[in-house]
């Protein structure tokens, strides 16, 4: 089961209810950072992310993080032994390089637990890692993701200001569609299909077309 989160600080009501349901018997979590070279930053945001879970009554008995000191075997072992994998926010480019260097692609593809990617972490696990230009990225960037999403691509932290860049990316890279996830929203992907989680508007962006997702019709 895959969760793609658009961003935000903490989990809003709908995500709280979702995670309380699916994580209630999960005891272990492993984090995959975006800045593995910065241990202080990694530890800081690991604590922040864990607080989001503890705030809604979810506490893990075992917490791990894959770091630069892990060799391929120890990194993969952390994945295999965890109930939940959490791909952190930050820079998806460095995260994808880190995943590749630790040879986690196949391990994650074969993993049968729950995977949560927030912001950059969501982008990394899509078929294409789509980065729209902003103050941190002067140009649009499209990279190969590790495709844990059965070909689904997303945009995170979505606002209407992303539309022009998304249309351009779709045209230049031949992408069929992009699911636009707002700041506090999320998408769940499993064998039953796609579930949109959150009260803000979700959109599907296609070539020259933007469609609002009618969440009520999907329930």
Image (cartoon, helix red, strand yellow):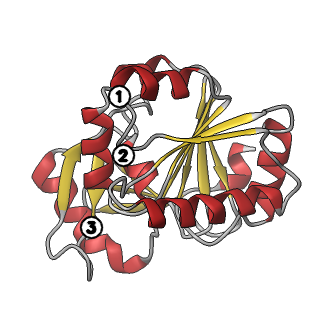
| x and y, in percent, of residue 206 in the image | 32, 54
CA gap, disc 1 to disc 2? 21 Å
Closest to the observer, 149 or 52: 52
Depth check, front residue: 215 or 113: 113
In this view, the residue farthest toward the top is: 110
Q: Position of residue 33 (x, y in %)?
A: 44, 51
Mark 1 or mark 2, earlier in chain: 1
For the point 43% across and 29% down, the residue is: 75
Say whether marks 3 and 2 touch (CB < 8 Å). no
Q: Report helix, strand or loop for mark 1.
A: loop
Question: Which element is circle 3 on?
Answer: loop
Of labels 3 and 1, the one closer to you: 1
Quarter that holds the N terminus: top right
The quarter of the picture where the C terminus appears is top right
Residue drawn where x is 78% and y is 33% of the image: 27
Q: Earlier in the sequence, mark 3 or mark 2?
A: 2
Residue at mark 1 = 71
Give the labeled residue for mark 3.
132
> Earlier along the polypeptide chain: callout 3 or callout 1?
1
For the question of whether residue 176 can be seen, the reply is: no
Residues under labels 3 and 2: Cα distance? Answer: 14 Å
């Amino acid at each position: 089961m895959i969760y793609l989160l658009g961003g935000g600080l903490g989990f809003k009501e709908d995500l709280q209810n979702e995670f309380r349901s699916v994580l209630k018997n999960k005891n272990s979590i492993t984090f995959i950072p975006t800045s593995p070279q910065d241990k202080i930053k990694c530890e800081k945001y690991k604590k922040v992310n864990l607080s989001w879970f503890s705030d809604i009554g979810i506490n893990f008995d075992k917490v791990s993080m894959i770091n630069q000191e892990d060799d391929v075997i120890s990194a993969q072992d952390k994945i295999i032994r965890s109930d939940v994998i959490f791909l952190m926010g930050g820079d998806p480019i460095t995260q994808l390089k880190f995943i590749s260097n630790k040879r986690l692609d196949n391990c994650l593809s074969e993993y049968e637990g729950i995977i949560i990617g927030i912001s950059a972490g969501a982008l990394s696990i899509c078929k294409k890692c789509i980065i729209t230009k902003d103050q941190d990225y002067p140009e649009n960037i499209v990279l190969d993701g590790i495709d844990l999403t059965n070909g689904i691509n997303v945009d995170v932290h979505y606002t209407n200001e992303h539309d022009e860049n998304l249309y351009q990316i779709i045209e230049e890279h031949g992408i069929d569609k992009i699911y636009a996830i707002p700041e506090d929203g999320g998408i769940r992907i499993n064998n039953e299909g796609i579930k949109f989680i959150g009260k803000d508007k979700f959109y599907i962006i296609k070539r020259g077309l933007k469609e609002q997702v009618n969440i009520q019709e999907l329930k």
